[in-house]
Image (cartoon, rainbow, N blue to C red):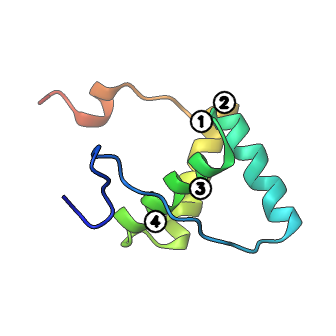
Amino acid sequence: MSDTDTPSGDPEKTNVNLRVTEALLEDIDATWRKEGYNNRSEFMREALRDAVRHPDLTRESWKEIAAVEHARRTGESESFSREEILGDDE
């Protein structure tokens, strides 16, 4: 059991204070609602997990991912099947 696990096996949570601009907070709130998260904290935890799990992804990489995702959602990009991407070997 790690230092942050309770006897029930659930990890303990610690509050972290974070100061952001009102504009960023509005963007965060719009995003978590649009993406279907239950609340702001759940969204922020997932964003932090992604940053920690994938430190090799640069800010530019995340921007590219966001741009591709936006294009996909708005129909501004072509769609490809899994088979087209992976080839006939799979």
Q: Quadrant of the C terminus?
A: top left
Residue type, label 1: Arg
Residue found 69% across the figure and 72% down from its top: 18
Residue type, label 4: Ala
- Mark 2 and mark 1 in contact? Answer it, CB < 8 Å: yes
Count of marks, rendered view: 4
Disc 4: which residue: 51
Real-space Cα separation, disc 4 to disc 2, in angstroms: 28 Å
Q: Position of residue 1 (x, y in %)?
A: 18, 58
Label 4 crowd bin: few (<14), some (14–19), many (20+), radius 10 Å? some
Disc 1: which residue: 72
Q: Residue furthest right?
A: 22
Real-space Cα separation, disc 1 to disc 4, in angstroms: 23 Å
At mark 1, the secondary structure is: helix
Where is 63 relative to 17, above or below?
A: above
Residue found 47% across the figure and 58% down from its top: 13
At mark 4, the secondary structure is: helix
Disc 3: which residue: 44
Q: Nearer the viewer, mark 1 or mark 4?
A: 4
At mark 3, the secondary structure is: helix
Q: Of label 4 and label 2, which has the lower sequence position?
A: 4
Real-space Cα separation, disc 3 to disc 4, in angstroms: 11 Å
Disc 2: which residue: 75
- Mark 1 and mark 4 in contact? Answer it, CB < 8 Å: no
- Mark 3 and mark 1 in contact? Answer it, CB < 8 Å: no
Q: Of label 1 and label 4, which has the lower sequence position?
A: 4
